[in-house]
Amino acid sequence: MGCCPEKERPTTKAPCSLIGTWLLVSCQATAVDDGEVVRPYGEHPLSLIMYTADGYMSDHDPGPAAV
């Protein structure tokens, strides 16, 4: 999906660099105080997120039962 020209872009649109479909392959957070690593979506997350040129977003996260 390409990005529309600047002159045609509404003010509520996502930046062109975000437009498209994204696959979550990992997610982790490291605690500042003790360095503990937490993976809130598990070791092998399965999720898609889509951003359209007209400002819509859709998240598809089937959860661990779908794996």
Image: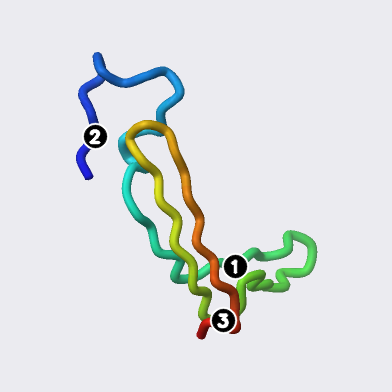
Query: Which circle's residue, 3 or 1, is located before the other in the chain?
Result: 1
- Whether tag 3 and tag 1 are in contact, CB under 8 A, the answer is no
Residue shown at the point (67%, 73%) measured from the top left: 37
Residue shown at the point (26%, 18%) measured from the top left: 8
In the rendered image, the residue lying farthest to the right is: 33
Give, as a three-letter code, the residue at label 3.
Answer: Glu
Q: Nearer the viewer, residue 39 or 53?
A: 53
- Whether tag 3 and tag 2 are in contact, CB under 8 A, the answer is no
Circle on res. 43: 3
Residue shown at the point (50%, 62%) measured from the top left: 60
SS category of the residue bearing label 2: loop
Disc 1: which residue: 28
SS category of the residue bearing label 3: loop
Give, as a three-letter code, the residue at label 1.
Answer: Gln
Q: Is 59 placed above or below 45 here?
A: above
In the picture, residue 17 is in which quadrant? top left
Residue shown at the point (52%, 74%) measured from the top left: 45
